[in-house]
Image (cartoon, rainbow, N blue to C red):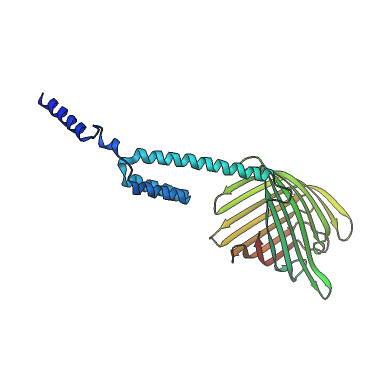
Amino acid sequence: MLRTKTLLTSAASAAILGFATVPSVAMAELPAPVRAMIDAAIEAGDEDTVRAVIELARTTNPDDGAQIDAILADYEVTLAEAEAAAAAAEEAEIRNAGLFDNWTGKGEFGAFNSSGNSDNVGVTGALSLTREGINWRHNLRGRVDYQETDGVVTSEQYLAAYEPNLILSDRLFAFALAQYERDRFQGFSARYSLSGGLGYEIIDTETMTLSAQAGPAWRRTEFVGGGSSSDLAGNASFDFDWDISDNITFTQDGSAFIQSGSSTFVSDTGLQAAIADDLSVRLSFTLEHDTEPPAGSVKTDTLSRVTIIYDF
């Protein structure tokens, strides 16, 4: 009886003083400075900072966990809505883009040293363009290596290629390839290649990417000495990029056309260093091997290049 009376008296006293008789945890309010700190982080717009500040608030104010959870839930809803709106706007922009919109690329210019069918120092230039769509990716590339001595051309290589990709999933894609080459010192005045197949992005991280693709191909070669040949072939290639640091990138590309007669294998190894926001210097070594070149030509050519690259 005495305990019951004491409890009733305590409750009556609390009522007189104006306090509710609920536990203190339920009454807890997030301190104004803490809430202001969270609001400031949200206003700044950096998600990592927001989550770090909220976790700090949770650690220093354990009794206010429910209110902090509610703030975090509201923030995540707002974040998801903003991301969805941005994605929808980006998709609309891509769908409404004109033929010449949304292209990115890089231009390359420098010098080369060749060995094999010609031993010379000359100039080299290249251009590559990429257009990303909803389900399609378009790649255009071209390269020229040229050297002239006393009015006589002593080295020349030309390459132009167009490769569209159909995106099938996050990593899988289908590709087609149309390619033109000319190298009189390798014994052909023109070489046309058509290919198609499947590709897969084997590695896709912030610092490293590796993709490979393969499929059937058809090649027609027109020889300098006259005549031509057309062959069915298999085409395989890979593209590896590794950001060693913020400014240094290692690249290794390879391709192969395998067929009866002369098969072609190409390896390109490069090291690229950024020297400004959109400017970099690249050292590269390219090896091309034909298993059965035209009479009078050697099987292996190499090119060492030093180039300046501008990204746009």
* Residue for point 75% across, 51% down: 162
As drawn, 55 above or below 124? above
Find the residue positioned furthest to the left.
2
User: Which of 214/245 is in front?
Assistant: 245
Q: Give coordinates of residue 6: x percent, y percent.
A: 13, 29
Find the residue positioned furthest to the top.
1
Q: Give coordinates of residue 301: x percent, y percent.
A: 73, 63
The N terminus - image quarter: top left
Quarter of the image where one finds residue 168:
top right
* Residue for point 86% across, 60% down: 224
- Whether residue 77 sits left or right of residue 295 in the image: it is left
User: Which of 130/254 is in front?
Assistant: 130
Q: Give coordinates of residue 297: x percent, y percent.
A: 80, 63
Q: Give coordinates of residue 53: x percent, y percent.
A: 39, 49
Find the residue positioned furthest to the right.
226
Q: How many marks do you count on the picture?
A: 0
